[in-house]
Image: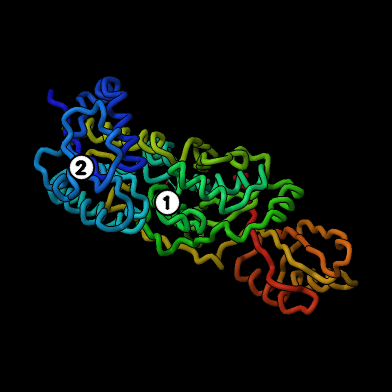
């Protein structure tokens, strides 16, 4: 049988990796897929010509629409990224009856509902394994491996750049900007790195995970997003003293009142496996009612790890080319007519424990007054720590851990605490999760 012809949009970090992996492992991949897979067409405005060394018969154009409109191409791999023209290209490929593989989390998180509806109507597949957690086959695990379970919650380190930055800062005391530059040079960071450090990239991925875990439509606009830029070295140190580590987590949880969907720095017990996931590595912890907690670990970014997920999707699509579209795995894990519009909880209706750090005057009654405000708001203190003031200083950091409290309840107490004359500046808040099921 002739090889399947594939059109590749984008010859950057992941596009280059995809070409390399498909070329290097061509025989093994063909044995798995049942047919050879050949990149016959590619589109890129600029690329390293070295990439094409040893690759036979590939037609490269600058206009990606040439590829999606080419009748020879059966599968389109979209690795351009961003919203536009990626959305138009993917919709055009679908309209032309082509299957699509994409690593584009922003595209799926924002336009996935529209894209999957179009694909469903046309009877083609849009595969997106590489969109979440790079090389970890997490979409397959949730959509297929855990399909017996009622999934209760997911907590993941799903941005490699952010994890790399937090790890280097903690272990080597390196400067934030310096580590970010290294992540960019290594091809981990987004084109706009604020997507990494402000949690937008993680929110794209969490939106997708929540959808396939709970069978809800993709709702990026309802995801709470908080970045890591306010974390100070002293927070990292206090966390360690309390037996915790700070990780930038995406968390989604099913509750009686709705679905929690949130990305924020989180203090987690240092003895949890996921607390020890460092560098650019990603990890996703999933609690299913039947299986219990399961943990998935691997490289979350980078050329060949991401290509590994892209190529696995291509193999899946090739295997399913002759199958009846009705019998394929549904895009969002649940049958399209079975998605349920559960409410997404606003962050102030989410209940978690908190770490609080504030700068207070070192004089009698200050701690009592702060504890009084928390008590009046029904907030219980779990642990408290105050150091001696440094030589010549009259204020000291006061650090506390609270028990679980509703976000809005804590916000009111914090507003009252920040009004106190003996408290200077703003109170630093970090959510605390035990992740113990
Ligand atoms: N910028 C992303 C990250 C790339 O650092 O995880 C993979 O999606």
SS class, disc 2:
strand
Q: Position of residue 73 (x, y in %)?
A: 14, 39
Q: Is 222 displayed left or right of 128 in the figure?
A: right
Q: Nearer the viewer, residue 256 or 419?
A: 419
Label 2: how many Cα within 10 Å (few below 14, some 14–19, many 20+): many
Decide: is 77 above or below 367.
Answer: above
- Farthest residue, direction front: 49
Taking the spot 88% from the left edge, 73% from the top edge, the residue there is 365
Q: Is 289 displayed left or right of 131 in the figure?
A: right
Residue hosting label 2? 99
Q: CB at mark 2 closer than 8 A to ligand 1?
A: no
Decide: is 413 above or below 322.
Answer: below
Q: Is 340 displayed left or right of 377 in the figure?
A: left
Taking the spot 37% from the left edge, 60% from the top edge, the residue there is 341
Taking the spot 59% from the left edge, 53% from the top edge, the residue there is 176
Q: Position of residue 223 (x, y in %)?
A: 46, 61
Q: Nearer the viewer, residue 9 or 383?
A: 9
Decide: is 50 above or below 116.
Answer: above
Label 1: how many Cα within 10 Å (few below 14, some 14–19, many 20+): some
Q: CB at mark 1 closer than 8 A to ligand 1?
A: yes
Q: Nearer the viewer, residue 189 or 361?
A: 189
Q: Position of residue 378 (x, y in %)?
A: 72, 69
- Locate the C terminus and report the quarter of the image it occupies: top right
- Locate the N terminus and report the quarter of the image it occupies: top left
Q: Nearer the viewer, mark 2 or mark 1?
A: 1
């Amino acid at each position: 049988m002739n090889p399947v012809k594939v059109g590749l949009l984008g010859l950057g970090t992941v596009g280059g990796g995809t070409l390399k992996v498909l070329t290097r492992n061509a025989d093994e991949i063909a044995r798995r897929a049942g047919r050879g897979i050949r990149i016959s067409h590619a589109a890129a405005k600029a690329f390293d010509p070295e990439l094409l060394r040893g690759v036979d018969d590939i037609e490269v154009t600058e206009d990606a629409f040439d590829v999606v409109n080419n009748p020879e191409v059966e599968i389109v791999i979209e690795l351009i990224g961003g919203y536009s023209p990626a959305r138009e290209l993917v919709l055009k490929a679908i309209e032309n009856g082509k299957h699509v593989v994409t690593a584009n989390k922003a595209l799926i998180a924002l336009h996935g509902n529209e894209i999957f509806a179009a694909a469903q109507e046309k009877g083609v597949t849009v595969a997106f394994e590489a969109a979440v957690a790079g090389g970890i086959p997490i979409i397959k695990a949730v959509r297929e491996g855990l399909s017996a379970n009622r999934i209760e919650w997911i907590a993941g380190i799903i941005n490699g750049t952010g994890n790399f930055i937090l790890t280097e800062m903690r272990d080597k005391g390196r400067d934030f900007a310096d580590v970010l530059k290294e992540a960019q040079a290594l091809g981990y960071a987004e084109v706009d790195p604020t997507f990494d450090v402000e949690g937008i990239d993680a929110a794209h991925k969490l939106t997708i995970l929540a959808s396939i875990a709970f069978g809800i439509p993709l709702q990026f606009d309802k995801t709470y997003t908080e970045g890591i830029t306010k974390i100070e070295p002293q927070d990292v140190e206090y966390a360690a003293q309390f037996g915790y580590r700070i990780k930038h987590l995406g968390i989604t949880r099913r509750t009686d009142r709705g679905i929690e969907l949130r990305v924020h720095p989180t203090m987690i017990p240092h003895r949890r496996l996921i607390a020890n996931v460092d560098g650019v590595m990603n990890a996703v912890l999933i609690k299913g009612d039947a299986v219990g907690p399961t943990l998935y670990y691997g490289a979350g970014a980078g050329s060949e790890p991401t290509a590994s997920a892209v190529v696995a999707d291509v193999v899946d699509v090739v295997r399913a080319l002759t199958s009846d579209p009705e019998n394929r795995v549904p895009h969002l894990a649940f049958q399209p007519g079975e998605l349920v519009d559960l409410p997404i909880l606003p962050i102030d209706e989410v209940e978690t424990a908190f770490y609080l750090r504030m700068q207070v005057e070192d004089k009698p009654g200050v701690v009592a007054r702060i504890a009084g405000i928390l008590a009046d708001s029904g907030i219980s203190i779990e642990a408290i720590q105050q150091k001696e003031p440094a030589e010549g200083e009259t204020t000291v950091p006061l650090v506390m851990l609270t028990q679980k409290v509703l976000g809005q309840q804590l916000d009111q107490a914090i507003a009252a605490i920040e009004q106190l004359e003996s408290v200077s500046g703003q109170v630093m808040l970090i959510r605390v999760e035990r992740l113990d099921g």
